[in-house]
Amino acid sequence: MAKKFQNFINGRWVDAASGKTFENRNPARWDEVVGVFPLSGKEDVEAAVRAAREAFETWRLVPAPKRGDIMRAVGDLMVARKEDLARQMTREMGKVLAETRGDVQEGIDTAYYAGGEGRRLFGHTVPSELRDKFNMALRVPIGVAGIVTPWNFPMAIPTWKIFPALLCGNTVVFKPASDTPATATALVEILAEAGVPPGVVNIVHGGGGEVGTAIVGHPDVDCVSFTGSTQVGKTIAETAARTLKRVSLELGGKNAQIVMDDADLSLALEGVLWGAFGTTGQRCTATSRLILHEKIHEKFLAMLVDRVRKLRLGDGLLPSTDVGPCVNKGQQETVAGYVRIGLEQGATLLTGGTVPKGEGLDGGWFYAPTVFAGVKPDHRIAREEIFGPVLSVLKAGSLAEAVTILNDTIYGLSSSIYTANIDAAFRAIRDVRAGITYINAPTIGAEAHMPFGGVKQTGNGHREGGWTVYDFFSEWKTVYVDYSGGLQRAQIDNYAK
């Protein structure tokens, strides 16, 4: 019998009010049920928000360094359980074990970084324009934070959001993706064990249409942090605007890697293989486009196709596997649909483009790593986010043309250029419209202590990671202390003659 899981509300594990449940299955072996989870609704969200609102009044008064101590304890527990967490994550979302270990490590790094920030929630002191007056600005918590996360990084992305939210003194209502609820539950278990008080962190499982919508629209949720599709992000922004709550949106990408004619082609090849087919291409930072200088176009394509055909598909728990499955049947069908679109629009299929068959593959949602050449900038496979193992190759005659092609999408998350020319590298840094630019490295590989996010329709300007996310989860409060003993009128008395 599959293990039964519950919501965590006000320090207690409870079923959904409706009693309804849903199954979580292994995408590499669809007949394997990972667990049964509560199919929650508005009533469950209401209970979680109420608990978070009540807990906020005491949690906000806990000194930030003490909150940081709890974050370090969380990191210690994650270190001790890293292998178990990684294996569970592979079972429920499919990516290879080396990647899920990295996913957990990113959470560990984020926990320890948050622990340090407990002593670094810096404010500002500035001179007053008046005599005998002291001015300062400091950061205070916002309130209840709604956290809605995707399935592709089921440990790392929740930690990017939850740890800073807690460190700043907020309480949390957390809705993880329905494809990866077990990893999210394990994270909440660790938070509770590390000493987070009841009501401070609450998890409510279920669908986005029910649980996610209820969280975003709830008047007692003060801010929302969401990672997912641009379409859903726009809906969240519209809903949140009705109550003027703060919203952080980290959305889609159509990331490109440029390879110039002076690049180290072997290095560039390793980069695009990792960027395009790591996590089965199911990353917002995945390399979905490859822009090759015309002088090395044919040579590099031959190198690329040879290596892609050697990638081994299979269960991510097996050490022989290079590429795991798509997360579910719907995602596999989306990938297949874009392959058909690419062929219909005249792109040339060089390899892949099929649902593979064979031992260990028939029971999962696998799709062969796919490469298209002859792709034009106006082709849909060059413009729309596919979120799967499909790489579109375009040709450019110069750096300027390559950058123009790279910028020609509604997205602007990650970007990459391989070149030995320092001038070209710095021109790309200047001219590429993206939140992240890599020089001689793939489009994936963000580090926990650096800002993460994009421009254009990739997001709404906020950043996760590093020091910047702490600004999102805190309010600036300005304080004036007048010890003159009399009434002073700023911007009037200071210039009186």
Image (spheres, grey):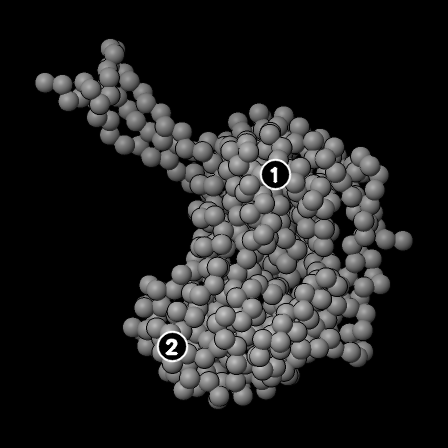
Packing grade of label 1 (10 A; few <14, some 14-19, many >=20) is: many
Q: Position of residue 246 (x, y in %)?
A: 50, 37
Residue 216 — which label? 1
Left/right of residue 259 with respect to residue 310 in the rendered view: left
Work out whether 114 lies above or below 454: above
**In the displayed structure, does residue 233 sit left or right of residue 125?**
right
Which residue reaches farthest top? 486
Callout 2: helix, strand or loop?
loop
Asked whether the viewer can see residue 218, the reply is yes
Is there a contact, CB below 8 Å, between mark 1 and mark 2? Answer: no
Residue bearing mark 2: 419
Rendered location of residue 16, percent (x, y): 79, 38
Residue type at the position of mark 1: Val
Please name whichever residue, 215 or 480, is drawn nearer the observer in this view of the structure: 215
Left or right: residue 356 compared with residue 291 = right
Residue at point 81% right, 49% down? 22
Q: Report x, y in % for residue 387.
A: 61, 64
Which image quadrant for residue 418? Answer: bottom left
Inter-mark Cα distance, 1 to 2: 44 Å
Question: Looking at the rendering, in which quadrant would you find the C terminus?
Answer: top left
Q: Secondary structure at mark 1?
A: helix
Q: Amino acid at mark 2?
A: Thr
Residue at image location 36% in from the left, 28% down from the top: 478
